[in-house]
């Protein structure tokens, strides 16, 4: 059994469209990190915390120790500064103004854990460059409400796809799960896609425009 320890609808969508059958549970953890910890180390640490919390919750509900739990965390990093989820519209506007016309990095930490003691974690990086954004464009996007629950104040699979000039690496990584890497790990753990045909369902990715995919980075 595969279990996603996340309430993110975007991560659930990616797993579902990847052809996987899974259960979903919430994994509430502290997202405080030690001062001076690098974003790469921090995003891995948070993914492991979420996977461990998800495992504890799953086993408390009667789950099998052989079941595999996925924990994940995504960070948007600009000039070594982590851009989290905006708390206000003004903060969202400021984040987008800072990203405008510049290149930033999206990091997703992924951890797989089981009650039998197995644990593996990884961090995947995607480099994203934005077009220059006008003030009116930013204000209209923020007013739509789309950026308010997203790291860096944008969702690449939504209207903000038009902001992207280019990206290098995994697109699904920016959405919340690097499916190319995750599929390899799941296969190594004996978990295969059950419904490959579901990949053909329109999940919004096929409509993504305004980017040039570069070589994949891991």
Image (cartoon, rainbow, N blue to C red):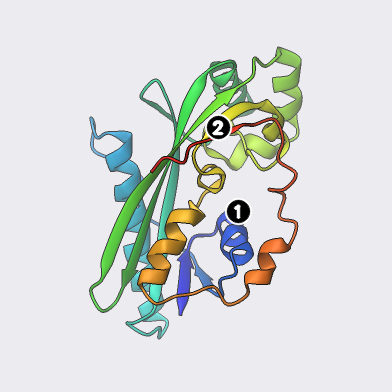
Q: Nearer the viewer, mark 1 or mark 2?
A: 2
- Badge 1: few (under 14), some or many (20 or more) residues near its Cα, within 10 Å? some
Helix, strand or loop at label 2? It is strand
Q: Are marks 1 and 2 in contact (CB under 8 Å)?
A: no
Location of residue 40 by image quarter = top left
Which label belongs to residue 114? none
Q: Is residue 80 above or below residue 135?
A: below
Residue at figure coordinates x 42%, y 49% from the top left: 73
Circle 1 is placed at which residue position? 10
Residue 96 can be seen, yes or no: yes
User: x, y (%) of residue 177?
Assistant: 50, 52
What percent of the width, then of the height, locates residue 166? Answer: 59, 28
Residue 215 is left or right of residue 210, and the answer is left
Q: Position of residue 152 (x, y in %)?
A: 53, 32
Q: Which mark is residue 167?
A: 2
When the figure is inspected, residue 211 is found, relative to residue 117, above or below; the finding is above
Q: Secondary structure at mark 1?
A: helix
Q: Is residue 140 left or right of residue 74?
A: right
Name the residue: 59% across, 64% down: 18
Front-lying residue, 58 or 19: 19
Q: Is residue 9 left or right of residue 56?
A: right
- Where's residue 202, x and y in %? 75, 57
């Amino acid at each position: 059994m595969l279990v996603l320890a996340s309430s993110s609808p975007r991560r659930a969508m990616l797993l579902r469209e990847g052809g996987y059958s899974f259960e979903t549970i919430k994994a509430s953890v502290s997202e405080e990190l030690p001062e001076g910890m690098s974003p790469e180390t921090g995003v891995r640490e948070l993914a492991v915390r979420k996977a461990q919390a998800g495992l504890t919750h799953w086993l408390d509900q009667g789950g099998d120790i052989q079941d595999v739990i996925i924990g994940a965390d995504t960070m948007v990093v600009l000039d070594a500064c982590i851009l989290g989820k905006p708390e206000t519209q003004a903060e969202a506007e400021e984040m987008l103004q800072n990203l405008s016309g510049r290149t930033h990095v999206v990091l997703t930490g992924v951890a797989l854990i089981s009650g039998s003691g197995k644990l593996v974690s990884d961090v995947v990086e995607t480099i994203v460059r934005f077009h220059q954004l006008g003030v009116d464009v930013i204000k209209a996007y923020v007013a739509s409400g789309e950026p308010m629950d997203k790291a860096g104040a944008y969702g690449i699979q939504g209207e903000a796809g038009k902001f992207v000039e280019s990206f290098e690496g995994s697109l699904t990584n920016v959405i919340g799960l690097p499916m190319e890497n995750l599929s390899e790990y799941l296969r190594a753990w004996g978990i295969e896609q059950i419904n490959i045909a579901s990949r053909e369902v329109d999940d919004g990715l096929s409509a993504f425009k305004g980017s040039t995919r570069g070589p994949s980075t891991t």
